[in-house]
Structure formats: structure tokens, C-alpha cells
Amino acid sequence: MSRSLISRSPDLKQLEDEGYEIEIRGGYLMLKGVPYVTKDKTVQFGALVSDLELAGNKTATPQNHVVMFVGDMPCDKDGRELTAIQHSSQDQDLGGSLTVNRSFSSKPKEGYTDYHQKMTTYVSIISTPAQSIEPNANARPFAVLQDKSEYSVFEYPETASSRAGIRALTEKLRIETVAIIGLGGTGSYILDFLAKTPVQEIHLFDGDRFGNHNAFRSPGAPSIDKLASAPMKAEYFRDIYSEMHKNIFANGFLDESNVQLLREMTFVFVSVDKGSSRKFIAENLSDFGVPFIDVGMGIQEVDGSLGGQLRVTTSTNQSREKTLSILTHFGDDDENDYSRNIQIAELNALNAALAVIKWKKLFEFYADLQDEYQSLYGIDGNRILSRTICD
């Protein structure tokens, strides 16, 4: 990914061709081997780090003029700090084993046209004093470059986290294997959200075909030709999201013949509409000791309007007993609150969002003050009722 981005971006390629040692790491551009003067008037070497603005698989015009730095505060040849570019002096973990120590600000009137201009401008400001002390100090070693960027599950660089400064938090979601059982309205939105995280593998389970009714409660907009081909749901969604995320695997229905596959999962999302299926899955996941989140919707028409609840139930080692008793009492009868198959796209998306937010809480991406094991969202009053272990 790093090599592809550099080769397709004229500004990055120019930096490389001119002998700068650059690397793409975790959505950031890193320019290493930058000489600078310390307070004691010695020459050391640091690294400039910039977030990246991308348009597909190549760089776009930088929107942020600030650059970060790995190293001490650069000084002039007499050991005085270069206060004209000083922005902040605070260590920041950017994830991917990358920690910066400070940031600089130097903005041209018209902004930077590309990353070559941005990085070389800062190199010149920082390195010129160093070269007055050691003329051979050079940020252009013409090093033999290798692609040292970490393996990425994405087909193109994920820069949203670096742009927001939350790369280290996003790394918490780099877990091994997540399964989604059921790719109806809610399950497909769960996939949409998960595909934007660094989960290493995503396993899809659904043996149904994708039809017109699915198109109106799932993310995206399939063509009429695609609907006419009646693709299998798991394969349809795998093909779409594989454009962004690697390692998405399609499977059919989950039953006795393949339920053991769940034993290998780090986490599972359950989005099924049959009580008997929910009971079967919940019991097996509990036996395997695999944490999971089960979602459900109970929507009814009353006096010409729709009302009801969205449910998110979280089963971990701490809540296993309580959640199993909830999830195994559902049946397939039409009177069950969560078996009525009224589904609306925005409710499916909200149910999925609540589930993924809770999942991210479990991995400490979001703060979790209540540690709830079940949440019920009431449509008519826009209320969320949460249940905790202590209730």
C-alpha cells in the first residue's frame, strides 16, 4: 500500500526521487533523517510527520499546514529555539509504534500546494542551522528504501483516524476475527461500520439471496441488473466491502454442520429474526466462551403510526447468565415482540450503530461508565433504557 501510494502520487514520488527517506505509516507521511541543532549546539537527526489528505490511491492538496516532529526542539546555530515555528510541545501516540514529541506551524499565504512543498519547507527551516555547523548534514541520504509500513487490512490508506488524531485509539480495534450472523437490514449496516475498522478478518453468515426488499433496508443502492441476478447475500456484501477491506469471508447458513466455526471467533454479532436460531446461536457461543452482541427490533403499527423498540444485548463472561436467559426465551411465534418483521432502513442503521458503539466500548475505544449488558431504544419517546449487572 505504501509503495503504491508513493508511486501514484507525484509529490511523494518527487520526495523519494530527490533522496528523502519517506515512509507511510498508519496513514501518516514520515520523512526521516532530518538534521537539526539542539540547545547544546550539537547536530541530531529527527523525523517530520504529516497527516495525509488522499483522493483514492494518491495524495490530494494538504489541508493542514501543521507538521509534527520526532525529536527535541530545533534551535538556530547558537542554540536558541526556533520559536517562530513552535506550535506545541507534547508527546502524542499516533499508533503503529509512532510517537511524536512536538508540532510546528509555518503556513504560506496560499497554503501548501502539495506534500513535496510542505515537507521540504520544514526541512529547510529546521536543517539550515544544522548545515551551518556540519555542512555534510543532509536530509537527503538517497537511502535504499523499503516498504516498512505495517500490514493493512484496507485496500487503500485509512486516513480518517490520523486526520482526527485518534490513530492510537483506532488501533484498539485491531482484533483478530469478527463474525456477523445474519445480513438483513441490521446485519448489513453492522458490516458497513465494521468494514471501516482495522478488524483483521470479517466472517459473514447468511444463506439467503439478496432481493428487492433487502435493497430498501440495507446500505448502498444495487442496480436492477444486480437484483435480477439474485446473488447470495453473503457473497453480495463480501464483494462490495472487499473493495475497501481485505479478508472478508462469505458463508451460508449457520447450523449444526458448521457452528464449530464460531469457536475460532474473537467476537460475534448476531442479527437473526427467528427465535429458535437466536437460541441455538446464543447457547453455542456461550458454551464456546465467545463474547457476542445480539440485536433485535420489535416494531408495531398502532393507530396509523409505527412504534416499538430496538434492542442491543451484550453477552460477555460477566453478563453471560443474564443474557442467556433473555435470548433463549424467544420463540418463532408471530406474537413475539421481536419476531414481527417490520424493518425500516433508518431503524436498522440505528440498531446497528448502537451495537457497534457498544462493541467499541468493550474494546475501550469509547468510554463506558455504566457497563450495560442490554439497551432498549424506544421510538415513540426517543429514550434509551439500559440494564446493568447490578440491576
Image: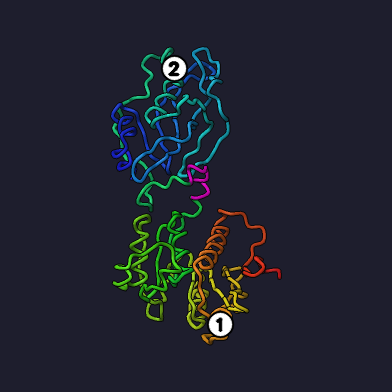
Residue at 33% across, 32% down: 11
Q: Please identify the quarter of the rendering in which residue 302 is found.
A: bottom right
> Which SS class for mark 2?
helix
Q: Quadrant of residue 132?
A: top left
Residue 106 position in % (x across, y down): 50, 25
Q: Residue at x 51, y 43 (%)?
A: 164
Which residues make up the magenta segment?
161-170
Query: How far from the left and from the top, in percent, is residue 254?
Result: 41, 77
- Residue 272 picture location, percent across and down: 48, 75
Are dots 2 and 1 in contact, CB under 8 Å?
A: no
Question: Is residue 233 depicted above or below 41 in this figure?
Answer: below
Task: Name the amino acid type tagged 2.
Answer: Ala
Which quadrant of the rendered structure holds the C terminus? Answer: bottom right
Residues under labels 2 and 1: Cα distance?
72 Å
Residue farthest along the front direction in this orientation? 304
- What residue is shown with label 1? 330
Nearer-the-camera pick, 181 or 136 = 181
Q: How many marks?
A: 2
Q: Which residue shows up at 31% across the image and 30% down it?
A: 14
Quadrant of the image occupied by residue 319:
bottom right
Amino acid type of the residue tagged 1 in the rendering: Phe
Q: Is residue 372 left or right of residue 241?
A: right
Number of other residues with Cα within 10 Å of mark 1, as a class: few under 14, some 14 to 19, many 20 or more = some
Q: Main secondary structure of the magenta part?
A: helix
Q: Secondary structure at mark 1?
A: loop
Mark 2 = which residue? 130
